[in-house]
Amino acid sequence: MNPEQFTVALQEKGITLSDAQQSQFHLYYETLVEWNEKINLTALTSREDVYLKHFYDSISASFYFNFTKDLTICDVGAGAGFPSIPLKICFPDIHVTIVDSLKKRIGFLETLADKLNITNVSFYHDRAEAFGKKKQHREAYDLVMARAVARMSVLSELCLPLTKVNGVFLAMKGAQANEELADSNKAIHLLGGTLRNVHTFSLPEEESERSIVLIDKKKSTPKTYPRKPGTPNKNPIS
């Protein structure tokens, strides 16, 4: 998917990019490729792959969730800024917080935000387990997102403690979403969540399957969660 096809594909979904926004995506791509030579940010470096499998794929969350003005978002394990930075370019009035465990990636994101001239973005070098215990972040976000970070049972423990009661946890998954959900029902319920919906679709051109999982936060997460760093991954709630 080249930049022109990307712009048209988004327009078909009701998202019209201005010239300035198209320039931001161009600069994002250039900065990503430049930094990727120094630190490992992505295995995909061709323009067509990045525009389809990173930019368009990230923005697909907005096809199933309304990114309203002043929405507060926490992106857990964003890596090179996916999905929240492409969404921020498309919806500049949202407020984005990114937490990532690798300091070098945070350095990239800070440089990127400066180059793209975007505001209302915050970056934290931290483990999600520790971040979710901090008073100013716990149950503080309207929407908590993660893309390709961990299995749903693990991801629920990282994300639901950060989600406001009556907020939403949104997980971006591939073809394995339903299988993962079957294994994570107990964790989701225990942590205060209720499954709202699973939206499955195919990515344009390559036709690979994607799923957007929406979980409503119905009650407060027990204080014992998340457990200490590393524990959710080693010993998922089951």
Image (cartoon, helix red, strand yellow):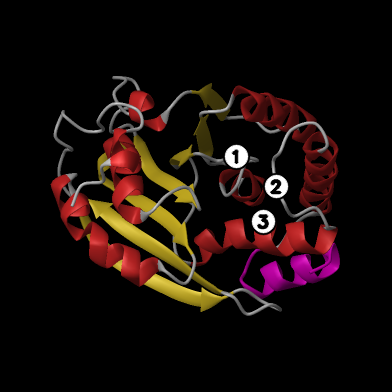
Q: Earlier in the sequence, mark 3 or mark 2?
A: 2
Spatial separation of the CA atoms under disc 1 and disc 3: 11 Å
Residue drawn at point x = 50 percent, y = 45 percent: 69
Residue 136 found in image quarter: top left
Q: Amino acid at mark 2?
A: Thr
- Side (left or right) of 206 relative to 97: right
Look at the numbered discs 3 and 2 and tell me whether their residues touch, using CB distance below 8 Å. yes
Instruction: Say which residue appears at 57% left-offset and 41% top-offset.
Output: 93
Q: Is residue 202 left or right of residue 218?
A: right
Label 2, residues with CA under 10 Å away: few <14, some 14-19, many ≥20: some
Residues tagged 2 and 1 counted as in contact (Cβ below 8 A): yes
Name the amino acid, label 3: His
- Residue topped by disc 1: 79
Residue 83: percent from the left, percent from the top? 57, 49
Mark 1 vs 3, N-terminal side: 3
Mark 3 lies on a secondary structure that is helix
Q: CA distance from mark 2 to mark 1?
A: 9 Å
Q: Which residues are magenta?
A: 1-15
Q: Nearer the viewer, residue 145 or 8?
A: 145
**Rendered location of residue 175, percent (x, y):** 47, 72
At x 52%, y 36%, the residue is: 96
Give the answer, above or below, for where 10 lies relative to 76: below
Magenta-colored stretch includes residue 5: yes
> Which residue in the protein does label 3 denote?
54
Q: Examine the image and state in which quarter residue 121 appears.
A: top right
Question: Between 70 and 140, which is closer to the camera in this rendering?
Answer: 140
Rendered view: 116 above or below 210: above
Residue at (85% x, 43% y) in the render? 30
Residue 42's disc number? 2
Mark 3 or mark 2, whichever is nearer to me: 2
Principal secondary structure, stretch drawn in magenta: helix
